[in-house]
Amino acid sequence: EIVLTQSPGTLSLSPGERATLSCRASQSVSSSYLAWYQQKPGQAPRLLIYGASSRATGIPDRFSGSGSGTDFTLTISRLEPEDFAVYYCQQYGSSPPDTFGQGTKLEIK
Amino acid sequence: QVTLRESGPALVKPTQTLTLTCTFSGFSLSTSGMCVSWIRQPPGKALEWLARIDWDDDKYYSTSLKTRLTISKDTSKNQVVLTMTNMDPVDTATYYCARFLYTSYYMDVWGKGTTVTVSS
């Protein structure tokens, strides 16, 4: 089973700053199979990025994804107040199918 | 518009079996590439993937929970049912269902979730 490790666990930044979130896989993951989700308190997760770098419908262009193999990154270029949330990476696998990272909490400094 | 809604008991006793239903609209589970996944989230903790059922009735389960889980679909009712046996207080969580697109490998629409507490 592929394990996804996200770092840091908590990231404290101010609005307007740049955020860089990491997701490392225990073995190589196809870029096509890597997605990022945002979750705000009391809400269901929302798809942000799929295929490692493609933005989902309606996602602002300040969100970008990159990476390949075992190292993937979610970057938020300029933080808006509504971006403070928990972010999860997720991979689709064939056996067993899916796993999530443990999440990165992005909090206001 | 694609929507999903989870339903089931809010409270179950230890050792009981939990049955959750995901009722969806806006797509058909008989369409190639359509799948429904279940994910849970204990209070204050991370998301945990549980199971998935595909349009062709293929089923997949979490390695750690597969002996306790059963997923099924009723295409005519647009429903997916997840059962989890031998419930324990550690299974207390919010349970989500989500549409998974097999051609794109992501969950694009999620239900709001249903909270299940396991307590005697």
Image: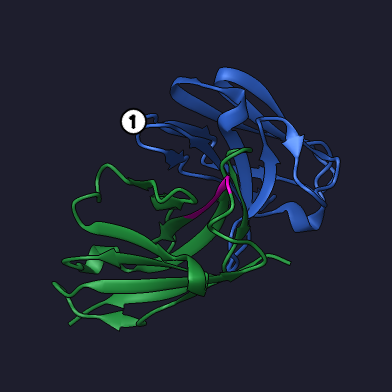
Q: Residue at x 48, y 64 (%)?
A: B96
Q: Colour of chain A?
A: blue
Q: Is residue A66 above or below residue B59?
A: above
The x, y position of residue B22, in whole percent, is 47, 70
Q: Is residue A54 above or below residue B86?
A: above
Magenta portion: prevailing SS class: strand
Q: Tell me which segment is drawn in magenta.
A: B32-36
The x, y position of residue A106, in whole percent, is 64, 48
Q: Quadrant of residue B116?
A: bottom left
The x, y position of residue A108, in whole percent, is 70, 53
Badge 1: residue crowd in 10 Å (few <14, some 14–19, many ≥20): some
Q: Is disc 1 placed on a helix, strand or loop? A: loop
Q: Residue at x 27, y 42 (%)?
A: B63
Q: Viewed as shown, does residue A91 lie left or right of B21? A: right
User: Which residue bears the numbered disc 1?
Assistant: A1
Q: Colour of chain B?
A: green
The x, y position of residue B40, in whole percent, is 41, 59
